[in-house]
Amino acid sequence: MKKVSNEESLYKDLINKIVKLLSKHAHKSFNYKQVAGMLGVEDKIGRQQINKILISLHKQRIILDLQKGKYKINQPSAKSLKGSYVVGKVEMKSSGKAFIICDDFEEDISVSPSNTNRALNGDVVKAFLFPKRKDRQPEGQIIEILTRAKNKFVGIVQISKNFAFMVSDQASMPFDIFIPIDKLNKAKDGQKVLVELTEWPAKAKNPIGKVIEVLGNPGDNDVEMNSILAEFDFPLLFPDNVIKEAEKINFTIPAKEITNRKDLRNVTTFTIDPIDAKDFDDALSVKKLTNNNWEVGVHIADVSYYVKQGNSIDEEAYSRGTSVYLVDRVIPMLPEHLSNNVCSLKPNEDKLCFSVIFEMDENAAIKSQWIGKTIINSNRRFDYDEVQKIIETSEGDYAEEVLTLHNLASVLRTQRMKNGSFAFETNEIKFNLDNNGKPLSVYVKQYLDSNKLVEDFMLLANRKVAEFIGKKTNPGHIKTFVYRVHDEPNPEKLSTFSTFVNKLGYKMNVNSKKEIAKSFEKLLVDINGKGEQNMVSTLAVRTMAKAYYTTVNIGHYGLAFDFYSHFTSPIRRYPDLMVHRLLEIYLNGKPSADAAVYEDKCKHSSEMEKKAADAERASVKYKQVEFLQDKVGQTFEGLISGVSKWGIYVEIIENKCEGMISLRDLKDDFYYLDEENYCVIGQMNSTIYKLGDKVTITVKRADLIKKQLDFAFVTV
């Protein structure tokens, strides 16, 4: 028997580690440098060995080379899995039909309403795959619900003599919930309620539930906003014990704490926020040095000093994961006493911060940096419009300091874009509301140079904090940290997107990472103000993959950063609070934190971030429908923003409200969708409706319950 040498054993162990790593992240692809980084291999020889192993595994078809030098585990395809079992997440349609989204392969699995087996939207399920039929989407049957996504639903209760039903607000909930009369909790017919699903017997057509909260009457602003929060499982109030614990925290900063920090109270410092902001979690300072360089400080509220890990405030903040910004209100992650008072960097008050301080020359080149705990005293609270006026006129309070920061930020931005950074920005819709929350007008938030000034310094701080931990590691050892990562686009999705925009007249070069970035940057400029802007932007975001939190650093593709984290908003984002705590641990020379524990927290934070975004979008859509409710029959100019087999989507130019014209309602011809050319064509008269076309529409229906707008073409 051949004796295995220690070197051979280590080599085999490395192969196993690589296969295990790629299997764990089966839906992602990595190059050899990323694999080496995740395994803690930093020396040149070790990286070369990993590269050789990856090439060998590729030859054996154990892994796939999806694009030049980027590998992923070779998972079986839907075709090869026929007759097997798969695990995935349910995406439910209003018709009762479902799709199962699996990480194992690209195609979704279609499930007919009769085969969903009481699964609901978002549930993690086990499904049996039917044999693949030629030219058909994979089909299957759900056989087991592994995890229920939620068991509470919002809707309108309909009461009969002997029973009641709750009709859900959500299109993704196709079942009415049966409610026994003795489980109505004093709800009245037609009211909005929160219902908890209690059981769903095997032979029952509908689930059974009980009313756990009466929200109020439909149409009332507070009721509707609270309904959205309840639908997405965000609490309406803080628990009493959390409020009491927060209120015990006072404003007095112990003298001993001040002596342990860098004292920056005499350095010119100010905050820049929206005019209606109440929590100020970041501030900027600037000081001219004797060598003519600039000292620029990015100061972030030290929430971790007040919110200790494991206390009731921390547990509630972790549960929420983030603050939620609805149209007319903020649901904070922290109690108001902390978010708006103790931690908020209000002017002329001593405040504790975690800071990153840079020495920069006039070309924004960083000569040195320092990261640590500080105490500041902000000189002034600016809003974005005030700073914008200073940038445009060179006049106003602290004009020299503001203009210095503006110039440095502009250089940082230019460098970032040159390195391949890009970001698709969709229109941010805002409303002017009356005292009852009724929308009086709709407008698009302007993104000013003052916004960019703050953003560029926040990006710099986030990047440098991540580099400080990510790069300062011993060979073979990586300190656990929370990264904000963004993967490279899937080659197939990128190719599909490129074909799509080419048909619209835009050119994409996808031959290299640099060319892709340049193409996206140019596309951003070219689509601005066009009818197809929103659809192209939305598809681009989907193509680009989603940013998320993780302890496994793969860099941030969209920003073109090798290291990136979220450090700058601990008042409203839990990951930033985790970053502050980890930074303090490592600055004090303590050992690395448990990666598994923090990875679970990262996953939870990513999920809560998505929930908050969905809730925010729901509130915007509700207000758009409400805004047009009294304008049914009125005429507007719009741009075709999307097409589907169901209808033509039109965005009204003046208020950015989007509605759909159903193809069924077009009586002058039979219209069909030309998927390849993204247009709708009349079969007889050959009339074409395509993306970006300017059209005139009337508002046909504004359904507040469904949050749905129906339009009709104005015929001449």
Image (cartoon, rainbow, N blue to C red):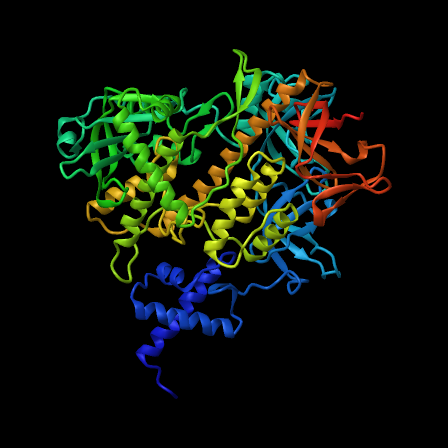
Q: In terms of depth relative to the viewer, which is nearer, 647 or 91?
A: 647
Q: Position of residue 51 (x, y in %)?
A: 40, 69
Tell me if residue 108 comes above or below residue 72 in the rendering: above
Q: Position of residue 490 (x, y in %)?
A: 54, 55
Relative placement, left or right, of 224 versus 9 is right
Q: Position of residue 380 (x, y in %)?
A: 27, 21
Q: In terms of depth relative to the viewer, which is nearer, 253 or 409?
A: 409
Query: Where does the C terminus fall, quadrant-wise?
Result: top right
Tell me if residue 79 comes above or below residue 636 in the rendering: below
Q: How many marks?
A: 0
User: Quadrant of the rendered structure where residue 281 is?
Assistant: top left
Residue shown at 19% from the left, 28% from the top? 267
Q: Position of residue 125 (x, y in %)?
A: 60, 49
Query: Where does the N terminus fall, quadrant-wise?
Result: bottom left
Residue shown at 52% from the left, 17% from the top? 432
- Does the image show residue 93? yes
User: Quadrant of the rendered structure where residue 332 is?
Assistant: top left
* Farthest-out residue, top: 435
Residue shown at 46% from the left, 42% from the top? 606
Tell me if residue 579 comes above or below residue 105 in the rendering: above
Q: In terms of depth relative to the viewer, which is nearer, 155 or 135?
A: 135
- Does the image show residue 179? no
